[in-house]
Image: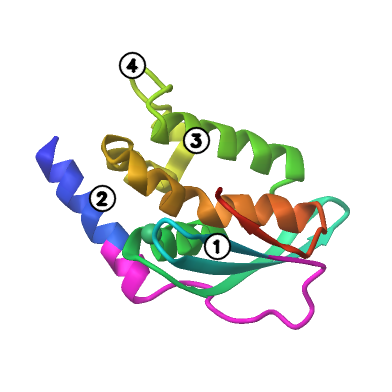
Amino acid sequence: MSELRDLYQEVILDHSRQPRNFYAMEDSSHRAEGYNPLCGDKVTIYLRCEDDVVTKVSFEGAGCAISTASASILTECLVGKTRQAVQELFDSFHDMLTGKAEPLPDTEKLGKLAVFQGVCEFPMRVKCATLAWHALQAAFDETNDSITTE
Ligand code: ZN
């Protein structure tokens, strides 16, 4: 289990150092900012949706390793998914982070997001890991306003 944990940490560090899809999308159809005052993390999520299916995702922002890696991995998980599928994925992710996915999270469904399962031992970090997802939900709602995790 500790080997798996090291691997997960490596994935998180890799994504935080070299975030994927890290740019401001000019032709986005949805966009929202998120802010986590507990840690100082900021993220802006850009989405392009066609017929309710996500076709492109990108983000910009600055924050701790967890928040940056979470946003980066999020951008790799959503393309081709409907809003409903994205919501189900977020629900599973959130259950894993808050320890509700007992006895074990459904790692097959979570895919890459499983690397964050250690976060459930650090409740303060849950908001770092979910910030990009809250911004994503705000983006879907086209509120275009800033949201905070408070
Ligand atoms: Zn953070």
Quick one: label 2 or label 4, which is nearer the N terminus?
A: 2
- Check the image and report above or below for 53 versus 28: above
Please state which of residues 142 and 23 is positioned toward the viewer in this rendering.
142
Is residue 79 visible from the viewing direction of this image? no
Quick one: label 2 or label 3, which is nearer the N terminus?
A: 2
Mark identifier at residue 35:
1
Foreground disc of the pair 2, 3? 3
Circle 4: is it few (<14), some (14-19), or many (20+) Cα within 10 Å? few
Position of the N terminus by quadrant? top left
* Residue wearing tag 4: 103
Label 1 SS:
strand
Q: Mark 2 and mark 3: span between their CA atoms?
A: 17 Å
Q: Mark 2 and mark 4: span between their CA atoms?
A: 19 Å
Label 4 SS:
loop
Residue 128: percent from the left, percent from the top? 42, 54
- Check the image and report above or below for 145 versus 83: below
Residue 55: percent from the left, percent from the top? 73, 62
Quadrant containing ligand 1 = bottom left
* Residue wearing tag 2: 8
Hey, which quadrant is residue 148 in on the image?
bottom right
Label 3 SS:
helix
121 with respect to 21 (left or right): left
Circle 1: is it few (<14), some (14-19), or many (20+) Cα within 10 Å? many
Mark identifier at residue 44:
none
Please state which of residues 111 and 149 is positioned toward the viewer in this rendering.
149
Q: Are marks 4 and 3 in contact (CB under 8 Å)?
A: no
Is 90 part of what is drawn in magenta? no
Q: Which residues are magenta?
A: 13-32
* Residue wearing tag 3: 94
Q: Are marks 2 and 3 in contact (CB under 8 Å)?
A: no
Residue type at mark 3 is His
